[in-house]
Image (spheres, grey):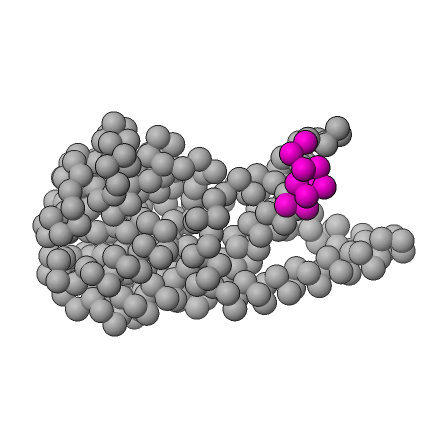
Amino acid sequence: MRQVTIVGTGLIGASFGLALRKAGFDGAIVGVSSPAALADAMARGAIDRGAPLAEAVAAADLVFLSQAIGRILDTIRHLDPLVKPGALVTDAGSTKCEIVDLARQVLTRCQFLGGHPMAGKESRGAVAADAELFRGHPWALAPDEPGELETPAARDFRRWLDRIGARIAVLDCDAHDRLVARTSHVPQLASTALAAVLEAQWQGAVPPLYGPGLKDMTRLALSSYDLWRDIVATNTDHIARALGDYIQELEHLRENLRTRQLQEEFTKGEKFARRLREPS
């Protein structure tokens, strides 16, 4: 692999560039983004230079699409006549079915392998990029066919994911979208809903009493709607079902507030929370 092109040099894209450099990649890293984002990524050392899409992908062995989902879909629609034949194109989209379905239809000169690094921060942009962002975190790969993982380009990409410390998880697109609806999308919506309720009640003020638990619970509410709009739009059915289960549990808690019959829920919740915090 001699050239990597990162389309979208925000937090994830710039962190990927920094991670590759730290892991020993000595080829060219080219960025495609807005002038301001490219300047920030170059200042951090995440990319060597910026270029327009056509120029940036023409010689790329790996094209990493790390934009918002709507932008990823738009880039895929324009990529096939521009990309180097035999290159590997992958992405960082938080949902997979629509992206992989579109790539199957329109990309004929290169291989596409759906991906999703499960890492991030509330801060955005290359200024917050971190070479260690992916270490110890899952990086989902969603091949359209199992054999797609065994091409030379895909094996090389997987080796680099190992080197940057990501934990590769392979699953099909629908399984991915169903799972992240529960482990990522509902937590975001729950945090946003709680913060929105409190904002409506306090209208710009801060409650006179609160502890660190409130900051923990509303941390995800700091996320941008610009990012989450496309996630919700491309995973609506799975999110709706997951929200239904969550709402049902909340209704059960409400119905039993006076009966003191909540020990089972607290016990189950504690068990799951402890497992999440055990060393992997």
Q: Is residue 189 left or right of residue 126?
A: right
Task: Name which residue lies at 16% across and 36% down.
Answer: 49
Residue at 63 percent of width and 43 percent of height: 195
258 to the left or right of 58: right
Q: Is residue 267 above or below residue 164?
A: below
Pick the front one: 55 or 162: 55
Question: Residue 186: which quarter of the image?
Answer: bottom right
Q: Is residue 199 left or right of residue 129?
A: right
Q: Position of residue 65 (x, y in %)?
A: 28, 51
Residue 115 coordinates in the image, percent (x, y): 34, 56
Residue at 13% across / 52% down in the picture? 54
The magenta stretch is: 196-205
Q: Is residue 277 magenta?
A: no
Is residue 237 found left or right of 149 in the rendered image?
right
Residue pictured at 29% horizontal, 41% vertical = 9
Residue 46 visible from this viewpoint: no
Quadrant of the image occupied by residue 46? top left
